[in-house]
Image: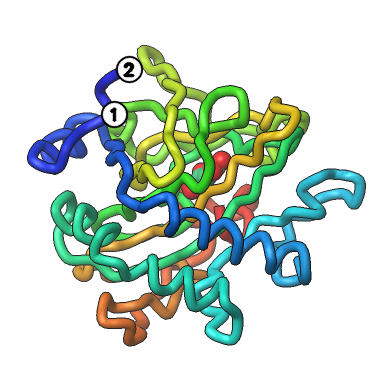
Amino acid sequence: MSIITTSEPGLAADYEQHGVVQLRALLSPAEVAEIRDVFMEQVDRDRSIGHDDSIPDDDVLARYPRFVHPHRRSDLAIGRLARRWMLDPRIVGPVIDMVGPVHAAQSMFYFKPPTARGQALHQDNIFLQAHPETCIAAWVAIDDCDAENGGLKVVPGSHRYEIVCPDEADPEESFTSTEITLPDGFSTQQTELAAGDVLFFHGSMVHGSGPNRSQDRFRRSLIFHYVPVDSTEISKFYNPLLRLDGTEVAIAETADGGACGDGWMPAAPH
Ligand SMILES: O=C(O)CCC(=O)C(=O)O
């Protein structure tokens, strides 16, 4: 289980081998607190900007919907903060070390309050459909995250496999409807992140999370996705991308359906 914690010198090699690496304390406690407070203030004041995941009203996630593409809301404090961190060299630097120059494609914020369901196992690039290479995620822990509060589970090495078309997820455990059945020989590993740690992972690396089974511990995370600057296409939900200087760039859009065909795929995001 030590394989996913690394230090900067071995970053690219570890990423290549495992498809997932964890860097400790990239953000200071004060920076984490600012992100937490700004997003909590927004969701408490107006959660209508949250993503529509068809969550029933009596589900705690209806009160704390995930925010998708907050960086596009320059009219809001969450938008300005998400965009700043999305382009911050402390996040983008390790990404470039691992995959070369990138554009930013997506931001998300998950609140995941106590008792909230998780997100079943999936691969990100089935949604982003970045080609010819895949996307890379930077998952910033805003709380300490572990098994109890629904911290991320990862499947190191699974990034070397092609996209696996998903089956149906268990609706008691997951607020998303599809789940990957792991190929033989693979198993999930529970991550443990302290607030301020960042987990970077490959767009084909299988990951997900279980419910938050704690009584009183939120499991908040600020999540970014990047794609190589040489990407020739992307699912239209992610256009326009952001260059790292903050200007917009649009690239060709993939046909609907992607690798697994029409019919199963939600409109996006993942
Ligand atoms: O934070 C989670 O529980 C899931 C997030 C995720 O799967 C992702 O960022 O791709």
Q: Residues within 10 Å of mark 2 (few under 14, many from 20)?
A: few
Question: Residue 15: x and y, percent?
Answer: 20, 38
Residue displayed at 75% across by 28% down: 215
Residue shown at the point (67%, 60%) measured from the top left: 40
- Disc marking residue 119: none
For residue 173, which quarter of the picture? Answer: top right
Tag 2 residue: 1
Q: Position of residue 99 (x, y in %)?
A: 18, 54
Residue 22 x/y as whole percent: 30, 37
Q: Nearer the viewer, residue 173 or 138?
A: 138
63 horizontally vs 167: left or right: right
Q: Amino acid at mark 2?
A: Met
Q: Is residue 91 visible?
A: yes
Give the side of residue 76 with respect to residue 229, left or right: right
Q: Secondary structure at mark 1?
A: helix
Classify 98 as above or below 91.
Answer: above
- The answer to whether one can see residue 260 in this image is no
Q: Are marks 1 and 2 in contact (CB under 8 Å)?
A: yes
Which SS class for mark 2?
loop
Residue 19 vs residue 255: left or right?
left
Of residue 90 and residue 18, the one placed in the foreground of this image is 90
**Few, some or many C-alpha atoms within 10 Å of disc 1 (few <14, some 14-19, many ≥20)?**
many
Q: Which mark is residue 4?
A: 1
Q: Residue at x 76, y 48 (%)?
A: 61
Q: Position of residue 186 (x, y in %)?
A: 38, 17
Instruction: Give the distance between the C-alpha atoms of the residues marked 1 and 2, in whole angstroms.
Output: 7 Å
Please name the residue shown 25% across and 59% down the image.
Answer: 90
Mark 1 residue's CB less than 8 Å from ligand 1: no
The residue nearer to you, when weighing 203 against 255, is 203
